[in-house]
Amino acid sequence: MNGGTGQVVLRVPCAADGPALIAANACNRDFHWPWATPPADEAAYAAWLAESGNGRTEARIAWDAETGAIIGVVTLSEIVRRALCSAYLGFYGMRAFAGRGLMTEAVGGVVRIAFEELGLHRVEANVQPDNARSLALIGRLGFQREGFSPRYLRIGGVWRDHVRFALLADEGISSKNSHSPPIF
């Protein structure tokens, strides 16, 4: 998939990406908290990488095309085929790129992968109610609110409430955010 601003490149993660992602996550630990607890050491990265290639999860690292820095991570997890044809969307970005629209582009690119390459019907995103940045991002992409899930997901050892959103393939991504980053 090509197009977009040319600033975001999506790549399937590999072992060689570990040191860069671990370092970026360490520098952004307070920016991610309490929304996400990404891999913080080699063992956690290896576990995440193994899960990312298990057939039920598709992950992409978003890179800045100019600097080679990591913009963020986007995952489709619990991919189910057959009658459900669905996945859960997860994402987190790095502070240095916040507010520039690059994570919106990255997440939009992965949602396109879900619909166009994986043939999924539905992508669900669950966001903590106080996470204004993530709520705004999925709103820009056209996700529709479906409900509220108390104590839905355990993050950092705490069960956290989430607001549930979904986007269906036949609804498509909001046209105002239709650019797609290159995929490698």
Image (spheres, grey):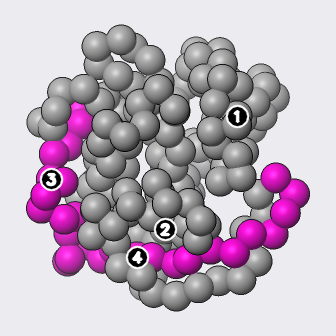
- Residues packed near mark 1 inside 10 Å, few (<14), some (14 to 19) or many (20 plus): some
Please report the bounds of the magenta region as a residue range: 156-184
Task: State the CA–CA distance, disc 4 to disc 3.
Answer: 17 Å
Relative to residue 47, is residue 18 depicted above or below?
A: above
Disc 3: which residue: 178
Place residue 172 in its image quadrant.
Answer: bottom left
Identify the disc placed on residue 125: 2
Q: Residues within 10 Å of mark 4 (few under 14, many from 20)?
A: many
Viewer-closest of 30 and 5: 30
Q: Which amino acid lies under the numbered mark 4 shown in the image of this protein?
A: Ala
Q: Nearer the viewer, mark 1 or mark 3?
A: 1
Q: Which residue is mark 4?
A: 166
Image location (x, y in percent) of residue 169 = 25, 72
Point out the image quarter for the C terminus: top left
Give the amino acid type for the residue marked by disc 2 in the picture: Ala
Magenta-span inclusion, residue 168: yes
Whether residue 120 is situated above or below residue 72 in the rendered picture:
below
